[in-house]
Amino acid sequence: MDTSKILAFRHASQSGLLLESWLQKLDRVPDHASKVTVLSDLPGVLQKIVFRGAREKLSWTAWRQDNAIWFFTARMVSAPLANVPRPGLKISGYDQKGRLIECGVWVDVPRRGWKRCAL
């Protein structure tokens, strides 16, 4: 049974909170960066990623410091960890020109923190 649609619907509101947790716990954004909260403050190429991702229930977050932008999208997926499927977060990171710079599936493991899944 394909659970991806169920997970996307059930966890769409949680994926943004989990993405923020991932960024904070893994120290992915510089301390002095400012959060971008308005879509129109992003470059057009990143706005297009947000619009395209709306169909997939993607959450997004962006941070800016001077001319640098850290932009991430996330969606809930079923992730294998220790051969047991569990809810995970597929995270993609982009630079300010819209180039994909990282992508992976992560699971927040109780008492162990965020762990990347080997797919």
Image: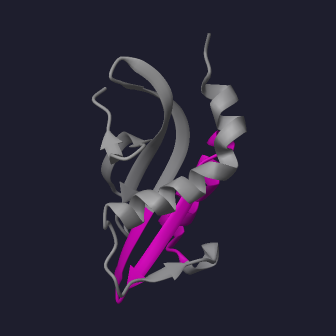
Q: Quadrant of residue 39?
A: bottom right
Give the side of residue 116 with respect to residue 18, left or right.
left
Q: Quadrant of residue 63?
A: bottom left
Q: Quadrant of residue 29?
A: bottom left
**Magenta residues (range):** 42-71
x, y percent for residue 51? 63, 55
Give the side of residue 84 with respect to residue 112, left or right.
right
Q: Is residue 69 magenta?
A: yes
Instruction: Depth check: give the residue in front, 94 or 35.
Output: 35
Quarter of the image that includes the C terminus: top left
Instruction: Depth check: give the residue in front, 10 or 84.
Output: 84
- From what the image shows, is residue 43 above or below residue 95? below
x, y percent for residue 76? 55, 39
- From what the image shows, is residue 109 above or below residue 48? above
Instruction: Depth check: give the residue in front, 48 or 66.
Output: 66
Q: Residue at x 50, y 79 (%)?
A: 35
Instruction: Depth check: give the residue in front, 112 or 51.
Output: 112
x, y percent for residue 38? 63, 77
Q: Is residue 67 magenta?
A: yes
